[in-house]
Image (cartoon, rainbow, N blue to C red):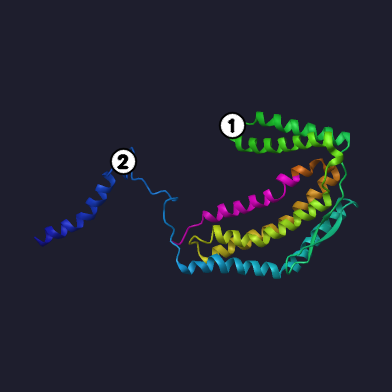
Amino acid sequence: MKAAANAEKKSAPVKARRQAVVNPRFTGFGGQLIQTHRALRRLAFPRSRWIDVLLVPALVFCCTLLAWPLIAELWAAIVSFWANRLGDQMTLGIGHSAFPGIQAIPYAYAEAALPDPLQWWCGALISITLLLATTLLPTRMLPISYALRVIGLVQLASQFYFYFWAAEFPYQSASSISALTQASMVLILLTPWIYGLLYNIFDFGIRRKLLLSVLAVLYLIVLTPFQYTFAAWLMLRYSLLWHPLIYLLGSSLVQFGALVGFYSWAMSWQRRE
């Protein structure tokens, strides 16, 4: 009798699982068990995780702020190196920020001119060629085709504007590069807080969360001077015709794309839970 009772107790969980699988509420068309979608799962968030959400970003933020004089020296060295090799018309500029603890923000200073007829026709040819070339790409490269079409359409709109209202263009290359560099400075300081709210809420361990923020901040620190020195040279060499494309698609969008890439990579790590 005891053996039969023990056998019945052991078989009870098996019967329950079989009933759960057989229950049409939890099974698919082929009889397989339907897993709960991650959007409907409840996230376990113990109080101790507030340390990851608040203290880790605060630590990276304070270290970046304290290291800003060294970062400014690095940016100035990079910009000066390339400015001396890309032409006499590009120099090192120093912007000033009202952010506490940050005074000097080096950037590539260059005063670009309006496009001449040859530059305008070259830009139009490039835009049309880019749009037509996307029709020749295979279907498997459709995302690249869409990206190239967006670039071509933005540049085509710039061609249209500079054909009719070139003299009324309200922006200058030097002030735009300075503003974009300052925006990058703000993004660098915000990066650990962005990851703190979007990544540190998960249980990946404090070392991985700290590693993600540090890698992203270091990447942006190195990327910014190269990115905007190249942008300043492009406008200086080929006129303000390329200013809208750089400002809309070649500035903060590139940096946010890098942050999304780091986030996607870090989300592939194995969780502790």
Label 2 sits on residue: 31
Q: Residue at x 58, y 67 (%)?
A: 56
Label 1 sits on residue: 139
User: Mark 2 belongs to which amino acid?
Assistant: Gly
Secondary-structure class at tag 1: helix
Magenta residues: mostly which secondary structure?
helix
User: Mark 1 belongs to which amino acid?
Assistant: Thr
Q: CA distance from mark 1 to mark 2?
A: 35 Å
- The quarter of the image holding the N terminus is bottom left
Query: Does the magenta segment cover residue 167?
Result: no
Compared to 245, does 191 lie above or below? below
- Residues shaded magenta: 246-273
Q: Residues within 10 Å of mark 2 (few under 14, many from 20)?
A: few
Query: Does the magenta segment cover residue 268?
Result: yes
> Measured from the top left, where is residue 262 in percent x and y?
60, 54
Q: Residues within 10 Å of mark 1 (few under 14, many from 20)?
A: few
Front residue of this view, candidates 174 and 213: 174
Secondary-structure class at tag 2: loop
In the image as oriented, which residue stretches furthest toward the left? 1
> Measured from the top left, where is residue 270 in percent x and y?
48, 57
> Measured from the top left, where is residue 238 in percent x and y?
84, 42
